[in-house]
Amino acid sequence: MTNNPNNKMAAANNLDDRFIDDNDSAERLGVSVKTLRRWRLLGRGPRWYKLGRAVRYSVADLRSWLAAQPTGGGH
C-alpha cells in the first residue's frame, strides 16, 4: 500500500461516517443526550468507544443495538 494522500483522505472520510458523537447518537436513537450518558455510566445502552477524551459511537453498533431491543404491539 502506498502513502497516497487520497487513500488517507478516503480512510478519514470513512471513519467520520462510522463514528459519531453523543449528540448525533442520541438523535439517531430518539433519546436525550442525558439519557445516553446515564446509560453509559450504568453500563447499559449501545457499545461506545473512548478516543482520547472523546466518546464516540459506531453507527453499525447503534443499528445493531437498536434492532436487538424488545418491541411491542406486534399482533
Image (cartoon, rainbow, N blue to C red):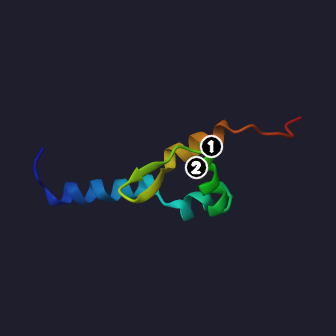
Q: Quadrant of residue 37?
A: bottom right
Q: Amino acid at mark 1?
A: Arg
Across and down, in percent, residue 60 comes to 50, 44
Camera-side residue: 14 or 34?
34
Most extreme residue toward the bottom is 23
Name the residue at 62% across, 62% down.
33
Left or right relative to 23: residue 14: left
Left or right relative to 16: residue 46: right
Q: Secondary structure at mark 1?
A: loop
Q: Quadrant of residue 53?
A: bottom left
What is the quadrant of the C terminus in the image?
top right
Q: Which residue is mark 2?
A: 40
What is the quadrant of the N terminus in the image?
top left
Q: Are marks 1 and 2 in contact (CB under 8 Å)?
A: yes
Q: Amino acid at mark 2?
A: Arg
| Other-residue count near label 2 (Cα within 10 Å), few / some / many at <14 / 14–19 / ≥20 | some
Q: Which residue is mark 1?
A: 44
3D distance between C-alphas at marks 1 and 2:
6 Å
Across and down, in percent, residue 36 comes to 62, 55
Q: Quadrant of residue 63?
A: top right
Across and down, in percent, residue 6 comes to 19, 59
Name the residue at 69% across, 39% down.
69
Disc assigned to residue 67: none
Q: Secondary structure at mark 2?
A: helix
Across and down, in percent, residue 3 comes to 11, 53
Most extreme residue toward the right is 75
